[in-house]
Image (cartoon, helix red, strand yellow):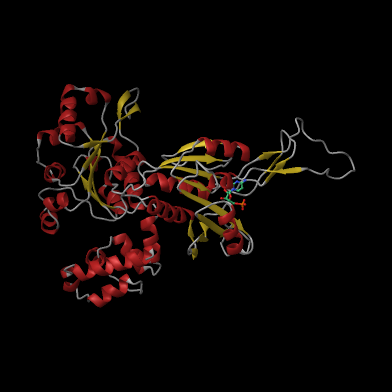
Amino acid sequence: MSDIGKFVEERLSALKKRPITAATEAGLERSYLRDLIVGKKQTIRADMIEKVAEAIGATPQQLIALQSGEAPARFAEAAVAGRSPVDGKRVLLIIGGGIAAYKCLDLIRRLRERGAAVRPVMTRAAAEFVTPLSVGALAADRVFSELFDREDEQDVGHIRLARETDLIVVAPATADLMAKMAAGLANDLASAILLAAGAPVLIAPAMNPHMWTHPATRRSRETLKSDGIHFIGPNAGEMAESGEAGVGRMAEPLEIVVAAETLLDTTPRPLTGKRIVVTSGPTHEPIDPVRYIANRSSGKQGHAIAAALARLGADVRLVSGPVTIADPAGVTVTHVETARQMKDAAEALLPADAAIFAAAVADWRAATEADEKMKKEGGKGPSSLPLTENPDILAGIGNHQKLRPRLVIGFAAETDKLIEHGTAKLKRKGADYIVANDVSPDSGIGGSGVMGGDRNRITLLSSEGAEEWPEMSKDEVAARLAALVAERLA
Ligand code: C5P
């Protein structure tokens, strides 16, 4: 079954099993919820989003996607496309009273843009540094700050605040807050929540370097670590106080986000222990010291595949031609220029469990490379450029007697007769799959087209036939392909 079908099935069965008291109390019928799941547009009152999401076993973000009419396809795809582990998670952010509190405004934005729902709690001292108004506006939630606020306690209560969350982040964690946590004090809302916490707690300490190294803070640190509290930072650097430097700067918002993602990441890693070789990007074939033959490949698709495989735990060895995009995270990269270098690098990485050839390797190179820049010869027009064929890396490895990986996947960028040409390549190159894509200018992919663009529409060819995938982002194609690799290598 397709991922989309599976997603819808899961939501529908969640709906059947779940007691939907909250939604029925508000007069919502199961048939209404069912329509939402299957993608029929429905309007939901803003204050009901959380309850309805709970009733259908989705996150508020997913529900909003459903409502927009693009879903379920869109978020079923997102579900397999390497989305952030904080997506759809509830993060309780406790803001302590330190100058670094201003960085929390950015932290809230970063968490929310990755799909987390952020519920802010501020200590009294925090409100001296940032206003509850800005914090509340960025979090799109109200700010909780008083333990003995009658309204807050009736509505939510500190125990619910502490329990109904997936992660608690304390940033900045001041020396005072850390000492309170270590001692188990609960005399304000922040410390009471931390004492009642059930979810993992991540703290980002920030304080003057003398305070950080003081024996009292050291004791708190040791205690908190042995209590299982997670730390991010502090970093070394300049302090807000002029002339002060040392360890005590709060970690940057993105570092805190990555730490939160790591803590919440429950992705199964089915490719752990598997080595996968990936080629990506174009090759440059020199004509003379300043000229070369190249093509329009950006490397985006191949790099996205390498990243998606790494997210599933694979030991990914990427051989990249000259590209302007960054090396993917968690991947070992060999940079090459020419087809022959790419071949040598790829073969040196064997044996491997799988190999994916996404590079747009130049078919030909100049038969001889001039040592000096070739000159215009006045009036004679262009001189001819004798070419010679490059080795076919995929065909060499796909048909290799001893070192052929268990799974070999190639690409076929075609401007006509996609299936016919792709199927011929499948056989000739000894591949298990050919990812065929139409790179003609009228392929219907917007902007700059498939080559260099961010979207792709592919047809997956194998001995079992042709499977057309809908147009999606290159990241989504990569995630699906990685899932297929995991299935085949299982
Ligand atoms: O023959 P064509 O270039 O269309 O084949 C495309 C597939 O073969 C891609 O997977 C590409 O990475 C691979 N290839 C290769 N070495 C070459 C040419 C293509 O690995 N010299």
Q: Nearer the viewer, residue 394 or 166?
A: 394
Taking the image as shown, residue 21 lies to the left or right of residue 140, namely left
Who's the residue at 19% across and 42% down the image? 123
Q: Quadrant of residue 67?
A: bottom left
Q: Quadrant of residue 439?
A: bottom right
Who's the residue at 66% across and 43% down the image? 390
Taking the image as shown, residue 328 lies to the left or right of residue 449, namely left
Residue 304's spot in the image, x, y percent? 47, 48
Residue 361's spot in the image, x, y percent? 61, 46
How many circles with numbers are drawn on the protein?
0
Above or below residue 40? Residue 398 is: above
Above or below residue 84? Residue 342 is: above
Q: Quadrant of the N terminus?
A: bottom left
Residue 418's spot in the image, x, y percent? 59, 62
Who's the residue at 22% across and 51% down the image? 143
Q: Nearer the viewer, residue 397 or 456?
A: 397
The residue lying furthest to the right in this view is 379
Residue 425's spot in the image, x, y percent? 59, 55
Task: Look at the image and tell me whether residue 99 can be seen.
Answer: yes
Taking the image as shown, residue 142 lies to the left or right of residue 484, namely left
Task: Look at the image and tell me whether residue 338 can be seen.
Answer: no
